[in-house]
Amino acid sequence: MTPASDLRGRVDKALQEFLQQAMPPVVSVAEELEPLVASIEAFLLDGGKRLRPAFCYWGHRAAGAADSEQIIRAAASLELLQACALMHDDVIDRSDTRRGAPSVHRRFAALHRAADWRGDPEAFGEAAAILLGDLALIWADTMLAGSGFSAVSLQRSLPVWDAMRVEVMCGQYLDVVEQARGGGSVERALRVARLKSAKYTIERPLHLGAALGDGGPELTSALSNYGLPLGEAFQLRDDLLGVFGDPEVTGKPAGDDLREGKRTALVALAFAAANTAQQQQLRARLGDPDLDADGVTVLREIIAVTGALAQVEALIAERLDAALGALATAPVAPMARDALTQLAMAVSHRAG
Amino acid sequence: MTPASDLRGRVDKALQEFLQQAMPPVVSVAEELEPLVASIEAFLLDGGKRLRPAFCYWGHRAAGAADSEQIIRAAASLELLQACALMHDDVIDRSDTRRGAPSVHRRFAALHRAADWRGDPEAFGEAAAILLGDLALIWADTMLAGSGFSAVSLQRSLPVWDAMRVEVMCGQYLDVVEQARGGGSVERALRVARLKSAKYTIERPLHLGAALGDGGPELTSALSNYGLPLGEAFQLRDDLLGVFGDPEVTGKPAGDDLREGKRTALVALAFAAANTAQQQQLRARLGDPDLDADGVTVLREIIAVTGALAQVEALIAERLDAALGALATAPVAPMARDALTQLAMAVSHRAG
């Protein structure tokens, strides 16, 4: 048995060991690169739920493969991919914070200011965050390739690895397009959720682990039947947390998604059920960067009284139910079934 | 014999074939992704010198390996890596043009304007260019992995592939730091040149081709002795073209590097040899975004009369000489020696 906290610890350790090997050759090129690699290390090791590694690990065990250090390293490489996605996402969204601390581009802007360098500190910060994200994307690859699996196993996992990386970038782009369009249907919001969360966060990590464990097509399809609805539940919970979440737990300011004007399924449902006065309020306040606590309260009330909140909770329950139903008949080892059940509950009911 | 133009044609064809396979699955996810993948295609197929593929190809032949479609595909994957570097570089430098046409982030800003979407068109364009660069970086990997080489050959080439990708990103970061610092020593400028050009453009592509052809350590080291000085010559030529190049050939406005304030070895040498009045001019005008044709002329004159221009030409000649000297005694097949000699001349004396 590998309880969740133990798995997190092993993933952290694998990341630390990888960085201890990968960082020195970079710093030896030029000492100016030290802040760059140090900030990847800080970013990676400051917590995070390690969800993707957990799904990858249990996809592997579901295929009947034994516990090993190889699968921990392969699973941990997903955190480097995620680091790239988050760093680039923060530049794109101009987010000032990440997990309650300044985002990478803000940190490098501060470094530029402290050194009293020329030019625009913000532009320097963005440049550093773009390149640092690239480095994380490259290292994800290096870490997976060096995980200790045979060349044959790695080659079997490549289609999944490639698809996952393409999907997350395309999901991000569709998300940006969706915000630019000012949102629209629940269906379009759910399509983005499917790419960004259902496939990238849950289904593909499961498939990656299964492929590395030589899982067959029957397992792959069972893992999809579990992972895709669960991934939607994950994203829908994210939507709720972005509006109603506790800043202490989420690490983001209260109502952050409202201030950003994120076009989520929750917001689309609120729009659809709102009366004219409520629609006017939504239009006027969503995406207002100066939205204060009172404004957040007004929007939260509309989302609650229109029934959008309850609808999203119902959608989450429905999807969790579908995921657990699929898991019940999936051809997986009992220990993996138990762990995947716990993960499904944690993902659907998390507070941050 | 594979003349340069023939090699370019084969690389173009390999890129086209790769994209024909890679694009449809992405577009099938959502039609909004069509402009994204279409702009990778346009970016890749609008020319370019295909230098990195040429060095990769001839590194392979130098190892005694036969001509093959595999090596063409592997070599062509370097263009996808380069597409990522250029797209991200253009965001970082806020460059409006690339190869005489609007840069990717400018194109997507225009798409945003044409669709009359919400928010800042420039921010949308940057988001698209960041994600598109990520996609190109991922596809580089996919194309190399699917080039047709065996898993064993690919694994042998991985350390080179990883090192090359890390080096280009680190070189970009050091370049950004160097601009922010306002430049300094010739030595620091050459260190950036070594990473960004000598290793990334020439040495690593040679090594990649050699590794895929099972070249031994003796060949690897001979290729370094040829590639590193040649790479510096390439970058020094680039410095000269950025100041004195013909816009018709370079695809960039005249004196573009002066307007950007690029801290190259050429500029560092001019500073070192300038008198007080000339130094004042350099300080006042370098990096002035509104620098006009007269301003460009003034700076060009200073760079010429201080002797910096002649010094850089001498440095190029010296490095070309070193590269050709190393090639003369390198353990490579005669046909490869001939091709690498021609490439060395082309790289050192190119006009754009």
Image: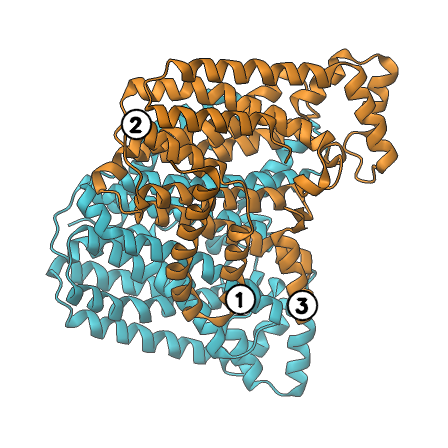
Chain colours: A orange, B cyan
Q: Residue at x 45, y 64 (%)?
A: B238
Subunit that carries the residue with mark 3? A
Considering the numbered disc 3 on the image, is that residue within a helix, a strand or a loop?
Answer: loop
Q: What whole-number distance in Å separates the C-alpha atoms at marks 2 and 1?
A: 60 Å
Farthest bottom residue in view: B275
Other residues around mark 1 within 10 Å, as few (<14) / some (14–19) / many (≥20): many
Left of A313 or right of it: where is B272? left
- Amino acid at circle 2: Ala
**Would you place residue B283 above or below residue B117 in this image?**
below
Q: Which quarter of the rendering shows the C terminus of chain A?
A: top right
Front-lying residue, A191 or B315: A191
Judging by the rendered image, the residue that carries numbered circle 1 is: B243
Front-lying residue, A339 or B213: A339
Residue B26 percent location from the top left of the image: 44, 26
The quadrant where residue B63 appears: bottom left
Left of A275 or right of it: where is B169? left
**Would you place residue A172 above or below residue B246 in this image?**
above
**Same-chain check, marks 2 and 1:** no
**Same-chain check, marks 2 and 3:** yes
Judging by the rendered image, the residue that carries numbered circle 3 is: A118
Subunit that carries the residue with mark 2? A
- Amino acid at circle 1: Val
Judging by the rendered image, the residue that carries numbered circle 2 is: A63
Farthest front residue in view: A1
Q: What whole-number distance in Å separates the C-alpha atoms at marks 2 and 3?
A: 55 Å
Q: Residue at x 40, y 47 (%)?
A: B81
**Would you place residue A325 above or below residue B295 in this image?**
above
Considering the numbered disc 2 on the image, is that residue within a helix, a strand or a loop?
Answer: loop
